[in-house]
Image: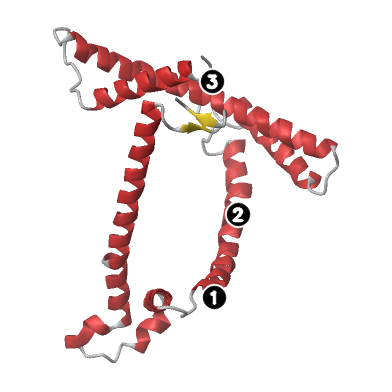
């Protein structure tokens, strides 16, 4: 029963939402009952999804606090990071909930210019993002050195394409092939870089997106049919 009831709810809701996506919304009260039922279900499910999302955020916040409080209590090696996480979470939560420095009232914008929350984002979060993104450049360079080794035909093509795109994005690289005459301008490194990004790269991205979409559809069909394995029970959902 614990598995059947959630499975029935999942199947009914999924089928109604899928059906509502292919039905034109009724304009008046003289629409067929089935059409009005699907439109009503679509609207009500959207409302309930928003309510469930709020509770999910609440449970996530409580879980974050409980997890890091436990780490601080046991005095583990990472308790300092947990303490910083807790203090940051509580400070931002209080600032955002009280709307300090911003327009009062329920309709007031919590991120209005001059508010404390906006100042926290501009003075703390934005510099941290910039720092993390700058560190990513070194990790990408290290990973590229290990991955772009010409050990096979595929890795050689990857290495060559990466070098062409890299040279085509910097002024020094464009100067290397600036001597090529105009009739053969398509051989310049910047033109080759654009071609790689527009043709092979776009084709690969679309192939990946199609594969991901097919995988999502297959997973959804298995979940609706109840044949997908339930990780919580260790057995099949059926």
Could you tell me which residue is drawn at 36 percent across and 16 percent down? Answer: 44
- Element under label 3? loop
Could you tell me which residue is drawn at 31 percent across and 20 percent down? Answer: 42
**Residues at marks 3 and 1, CA–CA distance in whole angstroms:** 54 Å
Query: Which label lies toward us, 2 or 1?
Result: 1
Residue placed under numbered mark 2 in the picture: 127
Q: Is residue 203 left or right of residue 145?
A: left
Answer above or below: position of 109 versus 183.
above
Residue 37, image x, y percentages? 26, 12
Could you tell me which residue is drawn at 26 percent across and 16 percent down? Answer: 38
Which sits earlier in the primary sequence, circle 2 or circle 3? 3
Residue 106, image x, y percentages? 52, 20
Q: Nearer the viewer, residue 74 or 58?
A: 74
Residue 110, quarter of picture = top right
Answer above or below: position of 16 versus 230.
above
Residue placed under numbered mark 1 in the picture: 145
Residue placed under numbered mark 3 in the picture: 105
The quadrant the C terminus occupies is top left
- Element under label 2? helix
Residue reaching furthest to the left:
30
Can residue 219 be seen here? The reply is yes
Which sits earlier in the primary sequence, circle 2 or circle 1? 2
**Residues at marks 2 and 3, CA–CA distance in whole angstroms:** 30 Å
Can residue 107 be seen here? The reply is no
Q: Is residue 232 left or right of residue 63?
A: left
Which sits earlier in the primary sequence, circle 3 or circle 1? 3
Query: Which label lies toward us, 2 or 3?
Result: 2
Q: Dot 3, crowdedness within 10 Å: few (<14), some or many (≥20)?
A: few
Q: Nearer the viewer, residue 156 or 119?
A: 156
């Amino acid at each position: 029963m614990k598995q059947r009831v959630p499975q029935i709810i999942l199947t009914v809701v999924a089928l109604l939402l899928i059906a509502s996506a292919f039905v034109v919304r009724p304009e008046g009260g003289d629409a067929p009952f089935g059409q009005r039922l699907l439109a009503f279900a679509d609207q009500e499910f959207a409302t309930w999804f928003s309510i469930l999302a709020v509770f999910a955020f609440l449970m996530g916040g409580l879980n974050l606090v409980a997890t890091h409080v436990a780490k601080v209590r046991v005095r583990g090696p990472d308790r300092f990071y947990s303490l910083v996480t807790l203090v940051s979470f509580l400070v931002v939560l209080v600032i955002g909930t009280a709307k300090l420095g911003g327009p009062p009232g329920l309709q007031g914008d919590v991120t209005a210019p001059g508010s404390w929350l906006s100042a926290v984002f501009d003075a703390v979060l934005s510099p941290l993002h910039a720092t993390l993104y700058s560190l990513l450049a070194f990790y990408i360079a290290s990973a590229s050195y290990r991955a772009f080794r010409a050990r096979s035909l595929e890795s050689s093509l990857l290495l060559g394409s990466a070098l062409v795109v890299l040279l085509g994005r910097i002024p020094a690289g464009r100067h290397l092939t600036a001597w090529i005459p105009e009739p053969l301008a398509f051989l310049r490194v910047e033109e080759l870089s654009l071609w790689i990004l527009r043709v092979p790269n776009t084709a690969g991205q679309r192939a990946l997106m199609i594969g991901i979409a097919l995988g999502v559809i297959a997973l959804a069909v298995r979940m609706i049919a109840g044949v997908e394995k339930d990780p919580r029970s260790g057995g099949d959902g059926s």
